Image: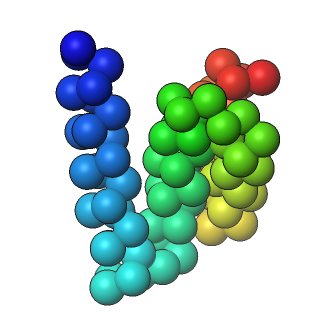
Amino acid sequence: TNDKKWIARGTESKHSIEKLAVLASRWNFQNKTFLLQAEEQFCARNFDVAEKLYDDAISSSKMHKFVNEEALANELAGHFY
């Protein structure tokens, strides 16, 4: 189905961002990693894990002053809650 296509694409993107977090700049990609992991866990219906990862994405974005990404994380977490 089309859902499998998007889940595979999201997983691929998550792996790419995780590599960049290790190879380039952990602080610059940490919030993105948390957010992609949260979305993945949400799709897998692991809601307790997703909740923590949304909160981590928001906190990391705020700590590193990524205002736009903090807003995105809050918006996606809002759909979750």
Q: Against 49, is 23 above or below?
A: below
Q: Is residue 32 above or below residue 8?
A: below
Is residue 1 visible in this depiction of the protein?
yes
User: Which residue sits at x=53%, y=76%?
Assistant: 27
Q: Nearer the viewer, residue 43 or 71?
A: 43
Q: Residue 80 lies in what quarter of the image?
A: top right
Q: Residue furthest bottom?
A: 23
Q: What is the image's colouring?
A: rainbow
**Does residue 65 sit above or below 45 in this rendering?**
below
What is the x, y in percent for residue 29?
45, 67
Which residue is more in the foreground, 52 or 68?
Answer: 52
The quadrant of the rendering that contains the N terminus is top left
Q: Measuring from the top left, give residue 19's x and y in whole percent.
A: 32, 73
Is residue 58 visible to us here?
Answer: no
Residue at left offset 52%, top offset 50%: 37
Q: Return the x and y of residue 61 as percentages of the image width and height.
A: 63, 57
Res 56 quadrant in image: bottom right
Front one among 76 and 44: 44
Q: Residue at x 25, y 51 (%)?
A: 12
Task: Give residue 15's quadrant in the image.
Answer: bottom left
Left or right: 48 as drawn, with respect to 10: right
Marker count (numbered): 0
Left or right? Give the position of 40 relative to 1: right
Residue placed furthest toward the top:
1
In this view, 74 is above or below 61: above
